[in-house]
Image: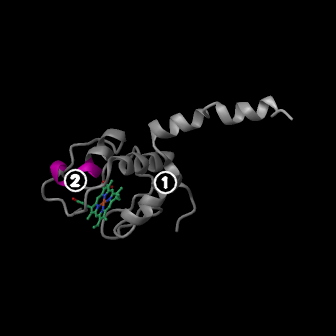
Amino acid sequence: MSIPRFLLAAVLLPAPWMASAAEAGDADRGRIIAGVRCMPCHHLHLESKLIGPGLKGIFNRVPRIAGVPFERWDDASLEAWLKAPRSIKPNTTMAIPPIAERDRTDLIAYFKRDENSEAADR
Ligand code: HEC
């Protein structure tokens, strides 16, 4: 019995989404990380403040906090902020343990997917 050719192809060919997920960040994983690392202090789906400002629709939004040199929260500014908030704003009250590079990339992919802007506030 021989293995059908299409099955072989499915196993042997790398799936295109694998490569792009690795480069662009894994938004599903980022969602889980946000739940663990950000939700203690931030609403993800509301604009209202908890300890820090709500992160609803944060990607591409104008910063609500004072003292950061960014016009928008985009890939570069979020990366810089999540890597070391104090290096951006020395007196910031966002004091967090370091976030691993892969986790930052995945978090940004999650915010970029922007599902936290959708109407389903919770
Ligand atoms: C210990 C509490 C705490 C945790 C945990 C925390 N933050 Fe914050 N965050 C804050 C506070 C407080 C501010 C306001 C800082 C300031 O005004 O200097 C803030 C500000 C921000 C801002 C600026 C918001 C705006 O509207 O301009 C972003 C973006 C942000 N946090 C993202 C995150 C992300 C993403 C995570 C999870 C990886 C996270 N924060 C985890 C407390 C926290």
Does the magenta portion include 1? no
Q: Comparing marks 1 and 2, which lies closer to the viewer?
A: 1
Where in the figure is residue 10, as x and y percent of width and height? 71, 35
Direction front: furthest residue = 1
Residue at the image position 51 percent from the left and 46 percent from the top: 113
Q: Of the residues shown, which amino acid type is indicated by label 1?
A: Arg
Task: Report the residue marked by disc 2.
Answer: 85
Q: In the image shown, does 111 or 27 lie closer to the viewer?
A: 27
In the image, which residues are magenta? 81-88
Which one is nearer the viewer's eye here, 50 or 99?
99
Which disc is residue 54 wearing? none
**Residue 49: where, in percent of width, then height?**
35, 67
Image point (21%, 48%), residue name: 68
- Image quadrant where residue 56 sits: bottom left
Per the image, label 2 sits on a secondary structure element best described as helix
Seen as rendered, the residue at the extreme left is 90
Q: Which quarter of the frame holds ligand 1?
A: bottom left
Say which residue appears at 42% left-offset and 59% top-offset: 33
> Distance between the Cα atoms at labels 1 and 2?
22 Å
> Measured from the top left, where is residue 65 in percent x and y?
26, 56
Mark 1 neighbour density, 10 Å: few (under 14) some (14–19) many (20 or more): some
Judge the density around disc 2: few (<14), some (14-19), many (≥20) Cα neighbours within 10 Å: many
Q: Is mark 2 within 8 Å of ligand 1?
A: yes
Image height check: is 3 above or below 95? above
Residue at image location 47% in from the left, 39% down from the top: 22
| Magenta highlight on residue 83 | yes
Q: Mark 1 or 2 closer to N-term?
A: 1
Q: Quadrant of the N terminus?
A: top right
Q: Main secondary structure of the magenta part?
A: helix
Give the x, y percent position of residue 60: 40, 43
**Tag 1 residue:** 29
